[in-house]
Structure formats: C-alpha cells, structure tokens
Image: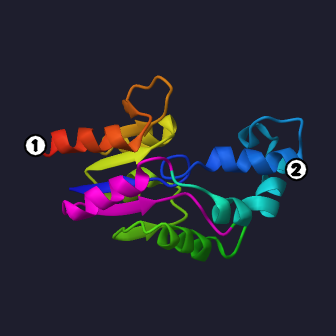
Amino acid sequence: MIIGIDIDDTITETTIIANQYLVKFDSNYQDYHDLPKERYYDFLNLYQADIVRNNILKEGCKEAFDYLKNSGCKIIIITARSSEFNPNIENLTKEFLDNNHLGYNNLIFMAKDKGLIAKQQKVELFIDDKEEVLDDISKYNINCIRFTKKDSKYKTFSNWYDIIEYIKNIRGE
C-alpha cells in the first residue's frame, strides 16, 4: 500500500508550536493562521526555522511510521513547505524527520497540487489535516483520512493509533 502523508498538523504539532512563537510576535492573535497575510509572511520569515527545529511529533506518529514501514507500506511525505520563508527549509525538515527516526520512501516539497502529485506517486491513501486539500486529492479517487477533531466529510481520526487500526482493517490484518 502506498500512503501519502502531510507534515504540518498531521505528523507534527505545528500549530501548537507556532502559536508559542506567536505570543512573542503579536499577542493580539491566538492562532498564527489568523494573522493578516502580510503579518503571516513576516511571522514565518522570522520563526519558520525555529518552529521546524522545535516541533514535536503527534502522539503515536513514530509507532505508526514504524508499523507502516514494517508492514511493507510505502510512505510518501507530501508537503506544501517551500523555501519561500526559509531557504534551508528542506534540510531542516529532513533533519527533523531523521532526528525523530521517521522512515519514509519519498519526500516532496512545494506541493501546491497535492492531488496531482499523489496520483503521480500512485498513492492509495492520503492523510492530511486540511479538508480543502483532501477535496483536491479525492478528485483522483484516492482514499482520504482527515487528521482532525472537527467534523468532516472524510474519515476522521484525532490520533495515530486509531489510524493504524483503520489501516490494519483495510489491509485485512
């Protein structure tokens, strides 16, 4: 099985970590996603490297990656991260994944069209936190999981342990 996985807020606790930096940047906002566009860009220019370096894995993520690799699944990480805010973002991301011992088969950056990329990579199941991203991916008849605690039209999970159980069921284990 080929599984596509997003990074931010799917593998990692990006919003939690970013919002810790937001307090230093502009305490008028609770969530960095709510910053006006210009301020959002300024924020990422200043803090993206620190956020990536100091990010933490979502609970169960390491175990999930280990299970997937050990059961013969191919893992393709597809992220919208780009060098727009930090020219070293690819190296920082790879370093983070390596430091957390997350094995993967391919890592694709600057993925503006995750659906098309997932199709080209022959992804069978995609895991992402954003509904609009999954809308694009599902157009290619790719099974989608949304990592969220919110309601969604997609199968939703808020932890990696339940995702692994779901994948085991799909695989007939």
Q: Residue at x 54, y 52 (%)?
A: 12
Query: Magenta residues?
Result: 58-83
82 vs 149: above or below: below
Q: Residue at x 62, y 65 (%)?
A: 82
Indicate left or right for 111 with 117 as reference: right
Q: Position of residue 22 (x, y in %)?
A: 81, 47
Q: Which residue is mark 2?
A: 25
Judge whether residue 59 is colored magenta.
yes
Q: Position of residue 50 (x, y in %)?
A: 73, 64
Q: Position of residue 77 (x, y in %)?
A: 42, 61
Secondary structure under the numbered disc 2 in the rendered image: helix
130 vs 70: above or below: above
Q: Position of residue 8 (x, y in %)?
A: 56, 51
Which quadrant of the rendered structure holds the N terminus? bottom left
Q: Which residue is mark 1?
A: 172
Which quadrant of the rendered structure holds the C terminus? top left
Image mark count: 2
Viewer-side residue, 119 vs 55: 55
Q: Residue at x 58, y 73 (%)?
A: 90
